[in-house]
Image (cartoon, rainbow, N blue to C red):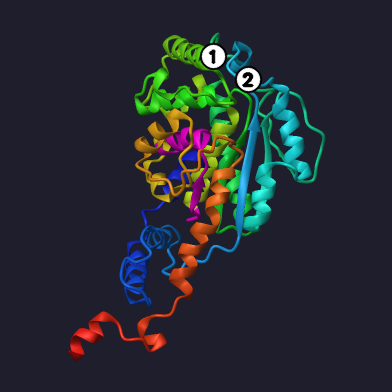
């Protein structure tokens, strides 16, 4: 618990001085004020996160955490649990959507086994944490122990430290785990005060009857275990997943190092709610990449107070939406840093024109 407490203590407020300097520079760039819309606001936010009035985001990574979920045995997914392991191997071979998008964005892919059911072969690019062969079935018992929940979050913190040591200016959350939309929906219901029907979506492609069953599974699990919404670790332990806890820790660890965190979709929203429950200051370090078609994602975004950059009807996971947003985020920073001011370019601005009139 000391690592978690110390990490939360290190998460500082946004750097208001850097934001003021960035805002002043935005007002002097060769454009009408506000002409770049949300990109201007984003660049100022990035200055506050990084503490640098002209942030640079050249070193980028997406961390894809994978784990299995015991609740998959309840028939809440259109795919069998062995797909988790198969997709992790696909990530390591570079053949998944996230690999393609990361290559395009110039970002490294970090693959983490947080608890895939069947052991994976050793691989130079695989980080093995493994807190167990997947969580337990939340219909029958808590998904994990309190110790496992804490270990998952702390593993994410350590991973953030390791990646920062490699060089990290921007990090995205990625996930893989059959059954993880059920766990995420349960977390969001508990922490955002929503009903299971408001957050249970189609996941891997369920029909209406299957979605209704999924909501009933979540409702039964919440009624049985009664997770405490004031205790994010309790919620994670009772209805969460190893990879969700790991991503929550990654968020906290990155925030403690002033690294902007780009959230992917639904699972990332659940992890962010856990992180914010553990340390409310971490909210300031979050950037919502996109709005997922999962109905519960809007609930999570609203609870976090975040407005997504993109709306492309995505629901893949893996960090795909987050990495798609990387070029926009980097563009905001580069516009602030590389555009000339009116004075530098020798262009008359509106204030100078008013003074000469």
Per the image, is 260 magenta? Answer: yes
Residue under the image location 42 percent in, 10 percent down? 223
Mark 2 packing: few (<14 Cα in 10 Å), some, or many (20+)?
some
Per the image, is 256 magenta? Answer: no
Residue 352 in the image: x percent, y percent? 25, 86
Looking at the image, is 339 positioned above or below residue 40?
A: below
Which of pointers 1 and 2 lies earlier in the amino acid sequence?
A: 2
Given contact means CB atoms under 8 Å apart, are the residues at marks 1 and 2 in contact?
yes
What kind of element bears circle 1? Answer: helix
* Disc 1 target residue: 210
Residue 235 in the image: x percent, y percent? 45, 24
* Disc 2 target residue: 78
Q: Is 235 on the left or on the right of 35, as rendered?
A: right
Pick the residue in front: 159 or 171.
171
Looking at the image, is 129 positioned above or below residue 35?
A: above
Residue 163 in the image: x percent, y percent? 63, 52
Residue under the image location 52 percent in, 66 percent down? 56
Q: Which residues are magenta?
A: 257-276
Determine which of the numbered discs, if any, sits on residue 261 in the image. none
Pick the residue in front: 64 or 3.
64
Count of marks, rendered view: 2
Q: Is 191 on the left or on the right of 246, as rendered?
A: left
Q: Is residue 240 visible?
A: no
Q: Is 302 on the left or on the right of 54, as rendered?
A: left
Residue under the image location 41 percent in, 86 percent down? 345
Q: Is 128 on the left or on the right of 347, as rendered?
A: right
């Amino acid at each position: 618990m000391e690592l978690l407490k110390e990490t939360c203590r290190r998460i500082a407020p946004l750097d208001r001085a850097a934001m003021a300097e960035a805002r002043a520079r935005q007002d002097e760039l060769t454009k009408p004020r506000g002409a770049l819309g949300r990109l201007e606001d984003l660049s100022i936010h990035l200055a506050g996160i990084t503490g640098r009035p002209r942030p640079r985001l050249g070193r980028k990574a997406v961390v894809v955490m994978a784990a299995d979920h015991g609740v998959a045995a309840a028939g809440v997914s259109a795919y069998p649990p062995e797909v988790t392991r198969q997709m992790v191997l696909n990530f390591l071979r570079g053949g998944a959507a996230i690999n393609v998008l990361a290559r395009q964005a110039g970002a490294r892919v970090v693959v983490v086994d947080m608890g895939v059911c069947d052991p994976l072969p050793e691989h130079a690019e695989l980080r093995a944490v493994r807190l167990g062969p997947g969580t337990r079935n939340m219909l029958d018992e808590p998904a994990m122990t309190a110790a496992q929940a804490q270990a998952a979050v702390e593993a994410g913190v350590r991973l953030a430290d390791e990646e920062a040591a490699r060089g990290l200016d921007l990090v995205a959350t990625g996930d893989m785990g059959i059954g993880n939309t059920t766990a995420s929906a349960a977390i969001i219901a508990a922490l955002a005060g929503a009903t299971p029907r408001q957050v249970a979506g189609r996941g891997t492609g369920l029909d209406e009857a299957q979605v209704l069953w999924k909501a009933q599974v979540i409702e039964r699990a919440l009624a049985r275990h009664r997770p405490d919404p004031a205790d994010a670790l309790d919620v994670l332990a009772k209805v969460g997943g190893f990879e969700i806890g790991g991503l929550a820790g990654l968020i906290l660890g990155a925030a403690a190092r002033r690294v902007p965190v780009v959230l992917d979709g639904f699972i990332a929203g659940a992890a962010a709610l856990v992180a914010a429950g553990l340390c409310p200051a971490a909210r300031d370090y979050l950037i919502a990449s996109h709005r997922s078609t999962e109905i519960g994602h809007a609930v999570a975004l609203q609870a976090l107070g975040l407005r997504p950059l993109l709306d492309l009807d995505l629901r893949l996971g893996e960090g795909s939406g987050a990495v798609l947003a990387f070029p926009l985020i980097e563009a905001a920073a580069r516009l602030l840093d590389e555009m000339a001011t009116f004075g530098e370019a020798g262009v008359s601005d509106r204030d100078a024109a008013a003074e000469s009139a």
